[in-house]
Amino acid sequence: MRTIRQIYVLVIFAVILSACQGQAVSPSPLPPTSTNDALRSTLIFKSTSQPALGTLPPTDIFVPETPQPINSGPSLGQVPTPAPDPLRFVFPTPGPAPVSAWRPPLYTVPWSPTPFDHFYFVSPIAADVVNWPLADYRYGGVFFADVVHTGVDIPAPKGTPVLAAGPGKVIWAGYGVYRGGNDPSDPYGLAVTIRHDFGYQDQALYTVYGHLDRVDVVEGQYVETGEPLGLVGETGKVTGPHLHFEVRLGSNDYYTTRNPELWLVPPIGWGVLAGRVLGSDGTLLAGQLFTIHSLASDGNWFARSYGNNTANSDPYYRENLVVGDLPAGIYEIRTAYVGLSFITQIVIRPGEVSYFTFHGRYDFKVGLPPTPGSDFNQSIEKTPTHTP
């Protein structure tokens, strides 16, 4: 026999249960996903309109039907020199994943904010994965004492689609981009080369996609911007999966590369930093380490000036250091030289190249280089200064 207390509890419970009938329990709202939906959107765009007034579009070029040789010989009168083997494209130990891999969509190519710019290519890796170059494996980096990196390495999981950075004809698909022939020991591994149907200053443009796991195009095939070429892999001389991407100007040759970060269009609202790094005596300074510090986000980017061999500078910027894909804002550039610390501020402007020079003890100078034809070094005359 139930006690009065038990009956009382049962009555209260029945009343509560009755009140709750027909009411759905609302789930707790999920925390916002950082940018997953935005990440799925591609950054690949194809321009269907004319370039904006004042921009410099790619030039039409006459391209012969016979592909140019992979390694062109020396010109008449030149003394031939042995061609160094690139040995290995080493993949570093991955660092911590970024807080967010989201980036804005790209400017529509061709994007040429000044007569000297040439952002003609889109990223060969889509936006749903990290698709910017590794800081330690930028163009012009030196490995194994004397091997200069002639492209940029873009980290991506094995099997990630590799996309055409611009329209053109496939002139190589398979092994042998460097050595020629169907050579599985070629340092580029499985690779694709595109000869684009536009050029720059009446010179042909080529892009190279190396270390693929699979090639999905054939020689002679025409591809449009964003079409799949194959899959990211780790064939050739590597220590991990990634895409090795090159831009070649004039001829399809290992020695005609240019820094891809001056050719890949930046995301909307982001910019590119380029610099010319000299010692106090006015000679190019190789391997000088710089830290680019964002005053807004407190983030840091790192880059070294080019090695002395194989890397080629843009004829206008004459740069030997480039850091692409920087959110617009105010940054500090820092470096140490001959035991002294040097620092300056620079504004990264959206869609543009921001430029600095470093002249050893003569410190930094911020501003675009003189127009072609003037003496570059005469524009750098400052009293030596430094910060403690």
Image (cartoon, grey):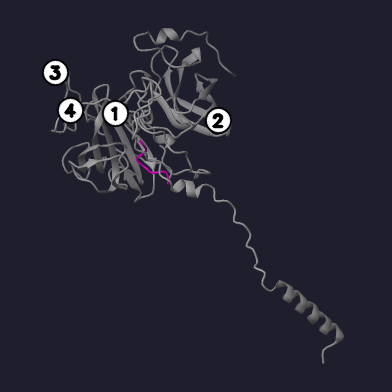
Q: Position of residue 68 (x, y in %)?
A: 16, 31
> Is 39 within the magenta?
no
Q: Which residue is mark 1?
A: 257
Which amino acid is tagged 4?
A: Ser
- Tag in front: 2 or 4: 2
Kind of element beneath mark 1: strand
The residue positioned 67% from the left and 69% from the top of the image is 23
Of labels 1 and 4, earlier in sequence is 4
Q: Which residue is mark 2?
A: 294
Q: Residues within 10 Å of mark 2 (few under 14, many from 20)?
A: many
Circle 3: residue type: Leu
Residue tagged by mark 4?
72
Instruction: Looking at the image, tell me whether mark 2 or mark 1 is earlier in sequence order.
Output: 1
* Residue 172 is at least partly visible in this image: yes
Query: Magenta residues?
Result: 122-128
Instruction: Specify which label sits upstream in the sequence, 2 or 3.
Output: 3
Can you tell which quarter of the image residue 76 is in? top left
Using the image, tell me which numbered label, if any, was put on residue 67. Answer: none
Instruction: State left or right for residue 40 relative to residue 331.
Output: left
Question: Residue placed at 40% from the left, 44% from the top?
Answer: 42
Give the SS element for disc 2: strand
Looking at the rendered structure, the kind of residue marked 2 is Ser
Q: Residues within 10 Å of mark 1 (few under 14, many from 20)?
A: many
The residue singled out by tag 3 in the image is 76
- Which quarter of the picture shows residue 203? top left
Marks 2 and 3 sit apart, C-alpha to C-alpha, by 49 Å
Secondary structure at badge 4 equals loop
